[in-house]
Structure formats: C-alpha cells, structure tokens
Image (cartoon, grey):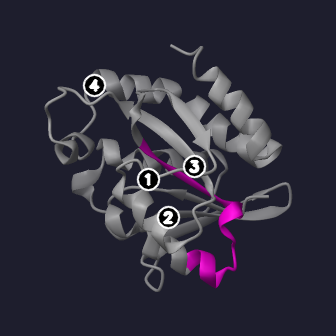
Amino acid sequence: MYRLIVGLGNPGAEYEGTRHNIGFQIVDNFASKQNAADWKKERSFKSSLTSVNIRGQKILLLKPGAFMNLSGACLQKVSSFYKIPPVEIIVIYDEMNIELGQRKVSLKGSAGGHNGMLDIINRIHPVFTRLRIGIGPKAPPEIDLADFVLGKFKDEEIFKINASMDQYIDCIERLLFDGPEKAMIHINKRIKNDD
C-alpha cells in the first residue's frame, strides 16, 4: 500500500499555471476530492503536507517547498521521518515526451532530463512509482527547454488539462486500490486509445 503521494512543482505564485507545476495541480485536485485538511507548511521538511484516509490507511500528500531541482531533499526528509520506503511512494510530475492530456505509469527508469526526478533518484532508491503527466510536445521545437517547462499553459491547453483531470485522479486511485502492476497495465494501455 502506498503511504506517500508527491506532486512536483516550483513554489511561489509566479510558477502557478506553468507546465512544470502540473504535479502540484493534480495533487491539489486529489486532496480536494478526498476532502483532505488544508495544506500545512512544515518548515522542518521545507514542504507542504496534508493527509487522507483511504481504506483505513493514512496516506500523506506532499508538495516540496524547495525549487524543482531540490525536490529530492524534501522528499528524503519526509520519507525518512515517517519511515516510508521508496516502494510506497508515488511521484507525480510533468513529462515532455508524452502528449498533453496523456499519462503513463512506470516503476523505474532514468530522470529523462527532469531535474526534480534526477534529485529524487539520487537521494532515494530509484525504484518508486512515477505517474508521468504529458505536457508535450515542446513547441515551438527550437524553444529552450527551461523556457518551455516554466512557461504557462495556453488557454486551449488548460481546457485539455481540466478535461483530463478526472483521468489523472483515476490513475492515482487505481494505483491505491489495484496496486502498481495492475494499474500500470490498465493506464498504459489506455494511453494509446485516448484522444
């Protein structure tokens, strides 16, 4: 059973609505759907935390308060304090190599150029569940990677994300209820059929 769900993003109002912050957006929506308590800033973890109870199990929700490339430091502190092993952690983050509105689950792999994931992999065991949320493709192709991921979604992209939000939440619920292997088969198969 999972005990920690992490949404990645950058702190601060100036980063709200950016592609890099879709992890924050999804974990916020999941917390709201589960009627979680208000997010609480924990200075000792440099993070915002809340929790939900699902099937009698307390699950922590985490938004790192450090910038993206130091996400692993926050996650390491929380998982160490609560004695949560990597196999009981879900990390939700933006993936440029997946089309906008699509999603994919994986249990291992490289950071794929994502600095937040690189820091997490370097600080905890590389085997944990990743819910990768598509923000791609990069457009225009010649745009600098940092400018793209730190750019805000366009109106039509926001519409597509909002239309896909129930599916993102469904991915989290399937991971919680069905376990990673079964959920991964369903989610990764479905990705090819959704428009």
Residue type indicated by callout 4: Asp
Quarter of the figure with the N terminus: bottom right
Q: CA distance from mark 1 to mark 4?
A: 29 Å
Q: Is residue 122 left or right of residue 125?
A: left
Rendered position, 127 above or below 190: below
Q: Residues within 10 Å of mark 3 (few under 14, many from 20)?
A: many
Residue type indicated by callout 1: Ala
The reply to whether the C-beta atoms of the residues labelled 2 and 1 are less than 8 Å apart is yes
Residue topped by disc 2? 121
Q: Sequence order check: which comes first, mark 1 or mark 4? A: 1
**Tag shown at residue 111:** 1
Residue topped by disc 4? 155
Q: CA distance from mark 3 to mark 2?
A: 11 Å
Q: Residues within 10 Å of mark 4 (few under 14, many from 20)?
A: few
The reply to whether the C-beta atoms of the residues labelled 1 and 4 are less than 8 Å apart is no
Front position in the image: 169 or 140: 140
Residue type indicated by callout 2: Ile
Question: Which segment did they paint magenta?
Answer: 78-94
**Tag shown at residue 99:** none
Q: Going 22% across and 39% down the picture, which residue do you hit? A: 148
Q: Quadrant of residue 2?
A: bottom right
Magenta-colored stretch includes residue 88: yes
Q: Secondary structure at mark 1?
A: loop
Q: CA distance from mark 2 to mark 1?
A: 7 Å
Q: Sequence order check: which comes first, mark 2 or mark 4? A: 2
Q: CA distance from mark 3 to mark 1?
A: 10 Å
Q: Is residue 110 left or right of residue 87?
A: left
Residue type indicated by callout 3: Arg
Residue topped by disc 3? 130
Rendered position, 159 above or below 127: above
Q: Sequence order check: which comes first, mark 4 or mark 3? A: 3
| Foreground disc of the pair 1, 4 | 1
